Amino acid sequence: VGWSMKPTLAREIVLDALMMAVWRRKPQQSVLIHSDQGSQYGSDDWQRFCKNHNLEPSMSRRVNCWDNAVAESFFGTLKNELIYRRPWVTRQQASEAIGEYIEIFYNRIRRHTTIGSVSPAKFEEMAQAKEALAA
């Protein structure tokens, strides 16, 4: 939903990614935001941003990758399907390829076993159709 690339893991990288997600989805009700225990997620800026945008932070337990298994799986898939397949000459070149991979292939085409072997876009489309029928 939201992503960012920076040369370091400073707090701006997570705030930029979260801002993209909030801008795209405009959550009207409280949304759970799960993360690992990186220092970026404990910053005052992160906590304030979450509070101001109706987001509820949730953190993995120390050394427990299972709490964040879907995200860990995404990064493994990204590395195997894109990153390790060619050398990247510039950060800009890598950023453009990663953006295309996420926005075009991963979210719209690639099937995910954790959501019933459909793409995330299709899964959300089906969820919205269910909500419309229930209303």
Image (cartoon, grey):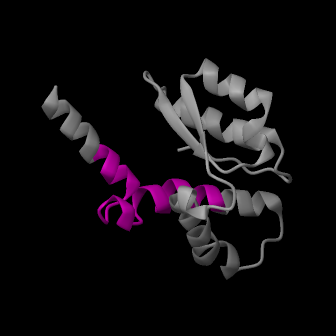
Q: Quadrant of residue 41?
A: top right
Identify which residue is drawn at 64% across, 32% down.
19
| Horizontal arrangement in the rendering, residue 45 relative to residue 67 (left or right) | right
The magenta region covers: 98-125
Identify which residue is drawn at 71% across, 57% down.
95
| Horizontal arrangement in the rendering, residue 78 relative to residue 94 (left or right) | left
- Eyeballing the image, is 103 above or below 24? below
**In the rendered image, which quarter contains the C terminus?**
top left
Q: Which residue is at the front of the view, 83 or 52?
A: 52
- Eyeballing the image, is 74 above or below 87? above
Q: In the displayed image of the protein, which residue is found farthest to the front?
A: 62
Q: Which residue is at the front of the view, 134 or 21?
A: 134
In x, y percent, where is residue 109? Answer: 40, 62
In x, y percent, where is residue 16? Answer: 70, 37
| Horizontal arrangement in the rendering, residue 42 relative to residue 125 (left or right) | right
In x, y percent, where is residue 27? Answer: 46, 26
The question of residue 118 being in magenta is answered with yes
